[in-house]
Each structure stands twice: as C-alpha cells, then as structure tokens.
Amino acid sequence: MATAFSSPRDEIELNNTDPSPPANSKCNVCQKPASFMCSSCGLNGPRYCSIDCQTQGWREGHYRLCKGNEQARATARSRTPNTQTDNTADTAATDVDDDTSLSRVQTRNSGISRFGAAQIINSRQRRASQTAANNQDGNIPMVELQAGETATDAQLDEEEYADELRFYIRQIYLVIQPVVICIILSIFWVKVSFSGTSDYAPVRPSYSIGSSSASTTTGTSSSSSVVSSLTTALVIVGQIVVVTVAIVFFFRKGWIKVLIGFFMIVVLGLLGFMTYLLLLNLIQVFFIPLDYITMVFALWNFAVVGLISIFWKGPLWLQQAYLTIMSSLMAFSLTGLEEWTTWMLLGLLAIWDLIAVLCPFGPLRLLIESSRTQQREVPALLYSVNAVWFMASMEDHFRISRSFLPQNGHVIGTNWIFGGSSRNSSASNLQELQAQVNRSNAHTPEPVADTSTNTQFGQARSESPEPLKEAHTIHNWRHSSGPQGAVIRGPQDGNGFTRLRGESVNTIEINSTDHHLETNPTTTLETDTVTPNPQRSDSDETPPDEEDAERSGLKLGLGDFVFYSVLIARAAMYDWITTVCCTVAVLMGLTATIFLLVLWKKALPALPISIALGVMFYFVAKAVLVPYVGALCVLGMVAV
Amino acid sequence: MPSLDKMSGTEILSVGKKMFYGGFAFLPLLWLVNVIYLWPTLKRTDVPAQLRRYLIYSILGCLAWFIITTTWYALFVNKRVTWGATADRITVVIPKGV
C-alpha cells in the first residue's frame, strides 16, 4: 500500500562556460604549463597540466565541446560530425562563446524541471537571440560559425529533451500497464466468483472481535454494524501497521534473512492457498471436472516456480506476471469483507500511507533512511519498472556506464516483494539529500563508503595511466546517458552510490544539482572521497549489478496494486458502471501521483489520491449514474 | 537480481543446472522456465557447452510430463462418469448436472 515512486534523475545540464580553446601549452583550468591534452580533440583541443585539471575541465563544460562527444552525438544521429572550431577562429570565438554560455548557465540555473517544456523552449529562444545579437558584432566567418554551433546545440537539446519525454512516457506506461492488468484480473475474479453459481466465493473473514462478531452478520446500516465494520477495518489496518513496523524493526536490526523468510512465507501462502480458493471458484463456475491429482500437481508447480522466480531467478516478464497475479489474488482475498468495512479500510489505509511515507517518523520513511545509512537494500515488495526498459534497449548505456559503477555485490532483497506492507524505498527529498551530503562531509569515514560517481570518475582518471582514453569513454558515456544514464551525475550521488544507489538516484532534484555544480561542497566531497580509497578503482572493471540501473525508475509497491484492485473489485460487485468509473478514477489518481512525483521529486504515497478519487467516483456513480442510466433504459431513450 | 547479460558463463551454467535438478521435484514448469530463460544465452560464446545438454534434457522432461499429465487428464475427463464413485472421490468440485 505504500508507494515507491522514484523518478529517474534528471540530467544535469552543465552548461558552463566553455573552456577557451588552446592557449598553446597552458592548462585550460589552472593556467600552469600543460603537458596533457584531450585525446579526442587533439591539437585543437584544450590542454591540461594534470588529470585532475582535465577532470575539472571536463566537468566545467568541455564535454559539451569535445570532439569525441560531438562524434558520438553525430553518429547517434547518423549524421556527419560537424567540425569543431578552427584554431584560427578560436581567439575571436572565445568572447562570444563565453557570453552565450553564460546566459545559458543563468537560464538553466533558474531551475528547469523536466516537464517545464515552455521554460526550456523560452530559454533556448533567448539564447538563440542572444547569440544572434552577439554575432552581429563579430566578423562574418564567426557569425556563421556561431550560428551553426547554436543551431546544432539547440537541436541536441531538443533531441535530449524529446528523449527524456519519451523516457517518462514509457515509464508511466510501464507502471500503468501492470496496474491495469491487475485490476482487470481482480474484476474478473470478482465477477466470476460472485456470479451466484459459486459456493466458494470468499466469505468475510472473522476479523471481528468478541461481541461485535454477532452483529456483523446482521445486515445493513444499523449503528452496530457500522461500529463492527469499523472495528474490522481497524483490525486489518492495525495488522498492516504492525507488519510494517516489524519490517522496519527487522531491517534496522539487520535481520534481512528473517525478512526474506517472512516474505517467502507470505508469497507461498498467497500463491498456494489463494490460488486454490480461486481455482475452486473457477472450476465450479465453468463446470471444469478436475481431479485432486492434477490440481495438486498444478498448484505445486505454480507456487514453487513463482517462489523461485520471484526470489531467485527467472525471466523478468515471469516475475512481473507473478507479482501482478499475486496482487490480484490478494485483492480477491479481501473481497470477502463487508462493503462498509472495505471503504473504511481503504480510507484508513490512505491515511496510514500518508503518515508512513510523509511524516518525519513514519515507518516507511525511517526504513528509507536507515537503509541509506546502513547502505543496505530494502527488501521490499516493489514493482519496479525499469528493468524492462533497460532490457528493451540501450545496451550501449550499460556497456558504457558499467565501467563507472562500482560493484554492487550480492543483492540482498528482491526488487519485488509483497506487501500490504510494501513500501517505497525510493524516497528522499532535497533536504535529505543535502543532509546526506553534509553528513558524509562531516564524518570522514562515511565518504569512503559513499563513493559518488563523480568520485569514481575522478578516480578512474587519476589512476589510469592513459587519461586520454578514459576521457573518451566518458564522453561517450556522457552523451549516451540519456535519461537513465543520468544515474551517475551530480554530487548527490554521494549517497546514491552505495547499495541504495537506485533510490537516491531516482530522486535527484535538478535545481539542487545545478546549485551544487559550482559550489564548494560538492567538490570537497569529491576530493574527500577520491583520496582515501584508491582501491575502489579496481571495482571499476567489475561489471555492476543491474540493480544500479534497474532501480532508477518508477516504482510502485505491490500494496498499491492490491488496494487499487480491492477498491475496484468492490465497485465491480455493484455494477459495471461503477467498475468502469472507479477504474478510470484510480488510474487518474495514479497519473496525478506520478505527476506530483515529477514535480516534487520525493517519494509519495500512491494510495491517497487514487483512493479518494475512486471512492468519490464510486458513490457519485452509484447515487447518480446508475439510476440515471437505469431510468434512460426504462424510458427507452437508449437502445439497449 | 542481476540480469543474464551480467552473469558469467559459468554462473549461467550453474543456474541451468540447479533449475534442471530442481525440476525433478515434480516441477516440469521449472524446466520450462529454465529453457525459456536460458535458451537465448546459448548464442553466447562464454557459456559452457554443457548448458545446451541441460536445457535439452529439460525440454525432454517437460515434454514427458506434458504427455503424462494430458493423458491422465484426458482419461479422467472421459472416464469420470464410468468410474463412478472412485472418480467422484478424487474430483475437486463435482460439476453440477454432469
């Protein structure tokens, strides 16, 4: 029921002042005598006195000008690489270049969100007009040169931007698709088992306590039944709260195996027992003759293979299918509750979700924080989406970014787990991130563990015998990191590059990153971390766990799946009109949550908006739409 | 969960082996998953050749189980009425009216 949403990191636009082209053999960064140059740009490129300076120069904007990068971009667009500035034009170019890039910095720093299309476009136009104005002062060849540059620049930006948009749209699609499937499955189960021909429809579980159990059976809207359904709902929510707190407790204690064992039992129970119950419904409604031998055999296969593929290994689509089915089974098992119990349960859960995720001492939030400080992955039941995306494409990204990711080691949990208590692990807001950065600055031992990417990057440079080659890889990487390659940018990754990499990566804020770009904390952090652990560099060679990349993306706790489905299953028990209305409302709520997620860039509870909309739509539809359509049919105004 | 691309050939082989032996616990579905999961890796050069053998055995075992279960089920469905009470005893839910 909690959510784990995480948006992939925004790409940080480092539109810095472009380093001026070679002032012969002086370092472009510190103006000392230089002995290195950029391997990709060759003689026309910038010079550097040391690898550190090259690193800095790269970060300060050379990556944008570098020929290696240009070529990578050009080949990516299957276009001929456009020629860099000539040496002759260099000195003249510098002024104009600086102006335009400065303006770029300003406009970018004003905090462009990924979806702030208008802003970006505006800033681009501004930039373009400024360059044009600047160019009028320059001499003629320069004008052409500059115009060409900005044109390609803008084109590049447009492309990157379009890429990002596509990435987000795909993410949203990837998260909504399983939700829809889960909802449809639940509707199907409900429609089948409550069609009246089944003796095995779920009955209300005996949650009610003591004296109220008698009154649960007496029907409708007497005050006692309200009280009893409230008690039932409270009991269920209480169980969920207890389980959540227990998970947080175990996690903080570090008893991961206990957690995994617990999750395995839950999954096995769901896949085994609930499938059995559902099967009873199905075979009765559809008159399937089935013997126990076959059924036990099939159930055994289904449950065990599900367990293996969820917790150990299996094709990704199988894992996702199992998780979706599991959620719908869970929702099915909850349809036995009374109507008012269901609504109260959903309302309480939405509130609990808000508390757990957003309150400073909410258990889910504590879970996230402790997982970050302990650098351990949360074994949570999350439907994470990105694996699909990564498997579908972008092998290049993997290959290139691999060398910069430290080995993740053995994965503790699974990405997917179950949960009435599943939680988003992907949350943090700006304050947290900054706090993290500060903390790791404060404690010197900590930065050692928190190797940021930039650190990795720096190390790779500082220890490679051949800096030029390194630089080239970095160019490619920088370029090819479209939306998700963004995994590795910016100072905030200081904490991200631990076990929990995915989580913090997901929640980077552009603004903060931009601010950090030029400010000292980041650089101090980097230098701090670079020096103490040179041994990390060998991890550069080892391929990282896919988790790194996989986990930057939208994540949705399975609990959210379950309770969306519960809501819609309850609606499906009334009428098709309410079913459809609620489905639309829930999906709308989900989309709105994702939108807010993109705006706020922190973990959000996925339940409240969807549940509120769903409940509202249900009652409105029930009170207005259903009688209205009924009346229309009766009056013959609709051809049925 | 690391993807197959990131796993070395020997790791993939061990996964295939484990899934193959695990399949003997009346788990033909596991064999099927094994084949579907690992078959694409056969193209890779670093995967040991034994993997193909395990996968083929998995296919065979899966087929055998498929034949067994379908035969049994066909028998059961067709002979259920004639078997009478014995069949009723092993039927999960006796279909109404048949």
Image: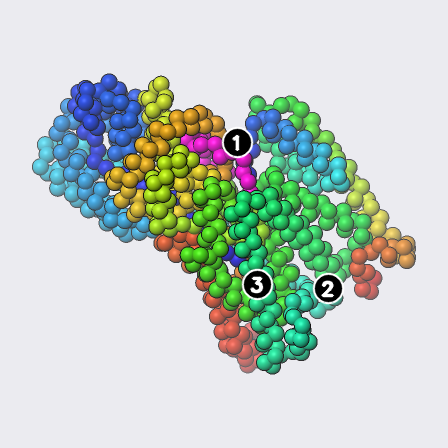
Q: Is residue A429 left or right of residue A567?
A: left
Picture coordinates of residue A521, whole percent (x, y): 29, 40
Neighbor class of circle 1 (other Cα within 10 Å; few <14, some 14-19, many 20+) is: some
Q: Is mark 1 on a helix, strand or loop?
A: helix
Contact between labelled residues 2 and 3, with CB atoms less than 8 Å apart: no
Q: Looking at the image, which residue is at 61% across and 49% down?
A: A263
The kind of residue tagged 1 is Lys
Same chain for the residues at labels 1 and 3, yes or no?
A: no
Pick the residue in front: B84 or A537: A537
| Spatial separation of the CA atoms under disc 3 and disc 2 | 27 Å
Disc 1 marks which residue? B6
Relative to A560, is A384 above or below? above
Residue A388 located within the stretch drawn in magenta: no
Report the residue at 52% width, 77% height from top.
A623
- Quadrant location, the C terminus of chain A: bottom right
Mark 1 to mark 3 CA distance (whole Å): 42 Å
Q: Which chain carries label 1?
A: B
Name which residue type carries label 2: Tyr
Residue A238 bears which disc, if any? 3
Indicate the position of residue A453 as horizontal and vertical percent values.
38, 35
Q: Which of marks 1 and 3 is in front?
A: 3
In the rendering, which numbered label is found on residue A366? none
- How is the model colour-coded? rainbow
Residue A200, numbered label: 2
Label 2 lies in what chain?
A: A
